Image (tube, rainbow, N blue to C red):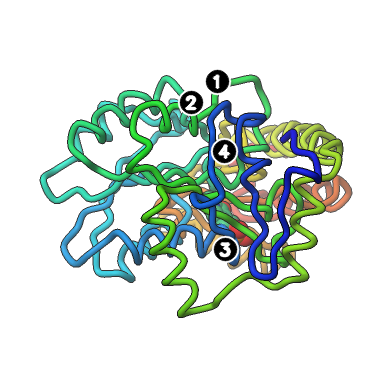
Amino acid sequence: MVASNRELKLSKTKVSLRAVLDKGQYGVDITAAEVLLTNGGKQALFNAALALFNDGDEVITHAPYWPTIPEQVKLVGAKPVIVQTRAEEGFALHPDELIAAITPKTKAIIVNSPCNPTGGLVDEAALTPIVDAAARRGIWVIVDLCYEQLIYEKVPHNLVKVLFDRHRDRTVIAGSASKSYAMTGWRCGWTIAPRDLTSVFNIIQGQTTSNITSITQKAALAAVAGPQTAVQEMLTEYRTRRDNIHAWLTAHPAIKCVKPKGAFYLFPDISGLLAPGTTSTDFAQGLLEKEHVVVTPGEAFDAPGYLRISYATSMEQLREGATRILRYAESLQPAKAGTR
Ligand SMILES: Cc1ncc(COP(=O)(O)O)c(C=O)c1O
């Protein structure tokens, strides 16, 4: 992000993020009329769902997914169509599999990169054929880039440019200040979308929540226009946390885990720890009750047998959490786990 304060406009109801979202970051021109600030990335995605999807429409997305994505599709009467990604392939999305899921009823494709919960990425090479296929058929492409600044390795990931070069008139970008700036509670997200669609978003939001609070507008402006060193520092810190918690947990022979490429979640396969007839939900519940550690079971993300562990907490907490998870794992099946 390379904006000066001079380039940013703060109005009574709207902070224009045009300057911070334009050439400096993506190498494309974006006008203020294409940007709307929303109450978090959630509202950004929901404005799009309300504006675009109708009863009977199909909307393709990839799993394991952040549950809000298919739930919003269902809330507006459309049908989520799910394309699986696999742990053994680093949760990479195969463009041909997604394209094969397109039918005459497909209204939109929703891509989340980096992905919550897997940390997987959809890079430029993977997105390009998807966008080309969507452009040929007039299908909308919605890209959730809420974790965009939390990518650990250098990967070509200018998805906005890929979309704008090929399919700008049917593209919606959803962004958020929640993750990069640790501003979840402030509720600031945004859409970048065609001008006409942005006007529709504006009507939807105007008749529901209205603008984001003026306090949040000022805080978000300070975050995006101020020095970005904190974002880089946190990325370095998250990388170390990722590496540590990954190493601590995978020291257990029954825990398998892909190292996430982005976001701040570990998504281990713990199926090897589950006694017959038990689920990762049972595991998460027992872990909470016995060791007071909160994790989200894979069932929430359409991935039974997995757990999602957030490492957006201190190293000390992570070390303690990992110790407790391992202790709980051993208490379940010490013989099988073979760690004694
Ligand atoms: C993949 C993904 N998209 C969007 C969001 C929206 O975040 P917020 O509404 O806090 O901006 C989240 C939050 O967890 C997320 O995980």
Lower sequence index among marks 1 and 2: 2
Say which amino acid is labelled 4: Gly
Lower sequence index among marks 3 and 2: 3
Q: Residues within 10 Å of mark 4 (few under 14, many from 20)?
A: many
Q: Residues within 10 Å of mark 1 (few under 14, many from 20)?
A: few
Residue found 70% across the figure and 61% down from its top: 184
Question: Residue 113: image x %, image y %?
Answer: 51, 38
Say which amino acid is labelled 3: Thr
Badge 3 marks a residue whose secondary structure is strand
Residue found 42% across the figure and 71% down from its top: 203
Question: Residue 252: image x %, image y %?
Answer: 66, 36
Badge 4 marks a residue whose secondary structure is loop
Q: Which residue is mark 3?
A: 38
Q: In front here: 287 or 81?
A: 81
Residue 248 appears in the figure: no
Say which amino acid is labelled 2: Asp
Alpha carbons under labels 1 and 4: distance apart = 16 Å
Do labels 1 and 2 touch, CB within 8 Å?
yes
